[in-house]
Amino acid sequence: MIDSIAYIFTRYCQDLIRAFMLTLQLSLLSFILGFSGGLTLSIVRTLAPKPLEVILRLFVEIVRGTPMTVQLFFVYYALPVIGPKLDPFIASLIALSINSAVYQSEYLRSAMNSIPRTQWEAALSLGFAELSSMFYVVLPQSLRIAIPTLTNELIYIIKFSSIAYFVTLPELIYVAKWIGSKTFAFIEVYIIVAIFYVVVAFIIGEIMDRINRRLSIPGLTVERT
Amino acid sequence: MSVLLQAIDIHKLFGKQHVLKGVNLDIEEGRTVVIIGPSGSGKSTLLRCLNLLVKPDRGKIIFNGIDITNSKVNIHTVRQKIGFVFQQFNLFTHLTALENVMLGLVKVKNLSKQEALKIAKESLLSVGITEDLWVKYPAQLSGGQQQRVAIARAIAMEPRLLLLDEPTSALDPELTVEVLNVLEKLSRNRMTMVIVTHELGFAMRVADEVVFMEDGRVIEAGSPEKVLLKPEKDRTRAFVSKLMELYRMERIK
């Protein structure tokens, strides 16, 4: 077993690495776009007047309530009917980003809601407007709170990016399946792929943990030794 | 002396609860006004109405000749001129003591970093927060220190008026003194202040005027001697004697 894994890995090393890089590119970009979108969405929803809030909430519920694959198929197959045909990478990027934006907006919103109203009052009393109170007082505190859940989201999206397989993007799972069907060594190649995912998740977990500790507020956050 | 702030017939309802039932209040420039009254009498709500943290349902607030309840007035600019000190201090938890004081100066008043730093340091020193504490975060400071930083944050903005909502209620008795001393100093320097407090000794010593509130109304107002020692209304007398009792017990301890 070990031998055949080693064989498959050396034989298809280049293909696997290329697929791995594609997976990484797609998921990191989706996360970053998703974060920008999620941040905007959560800020607007927190400060917006009621009617706008209701519309945005509807959007969130629709995206959150439909399967990711359906969203991807919609972007890849249905959108070209009214617009341009997108290549698999762009289509996957759009679908993943929108989906992640919605989830991230909810994580951020719950973090914002956990900041006591008194912090808002203190900022407003100094003469800050609502938006600046958000930026200078509430956001810096809520981002710290959201780091662990955002870490989850990042790891999650790296694994979920494999649905790009459905629109023929040669990412990790796609290439694994291709290697499997050529060599019939399905188990071996999936073990290799699983190791890739685990290692990435571990590294990201470690990095985010370090960021989290660096940003912890002295005296407020419980410090681990 | 000129009237700096005037509250006219202020009403506030929270749901069906009528918290303020037509309050009138004149704050003259350079005076220290102390508001006393039982809990639930609307003192804190009234104070929050004065800088529109709470929007009154009826009535007007004239600050420096301008009706700030008018929706055309930019309330954020007005609030720069009205400092607020909270019962629970409400320092920004993610910033050091020094950064807490600087934030408003840099981001609201658009001062340069150096100017803000200079003002912030002076302001912190004036409330007795020494250099070793400037880099501490709120969670690393005692309650009394936090409240003094909060006062420094408010006065650094050079407000025309300072509102204080039970500034010592969350503090241990020995920490109360250090905050009260700072307030007494501000009062002597003719900072216009409205203080909600239960510290009768402080009110007696420092206040130019004492206002007694109950059930959403001003019951009695006047000099501390008049309201605290020779109250005209029975309700004021009942409240003050109850507080005096507590005050005495506190001193025996």
Image (cartoon, coloured by chain):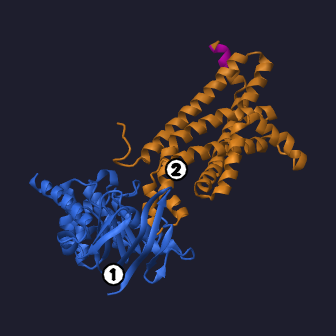
Chain colours: A orange, B blue
Question: Is residue A5 shown above or below A205?
Answer: above
Q: What residue type is labelled 2?
A: Met
Reading the image, the residue beneath label 1 is B28
Q: In this view, does A43 lie to the left or right of B22?
A: right
Reading the image, the residue beneath label 2 is A112
| Residue nearest the viewer, comparing A36 with B81 | B81
Q: In this view, does B189 lie to the left or right of A222?
A: left
Q: Residue furthest top?
A: A1
Q: What element carries label 1?
A: strand
Q: Tell me the tag on residue A223.
A: none
Q: In this view, does A193 lie to the left or right of B31?
A: right
Count every numbered label the image shows and give the total: 2
Cα distance between the residues tagged 1 and 2: 39 Å
> Does the rendering let one see residue B109?
no
Between tags 1 and 2, which lies in front? 1
Q: Mark 2 lies on which chain?
A: A
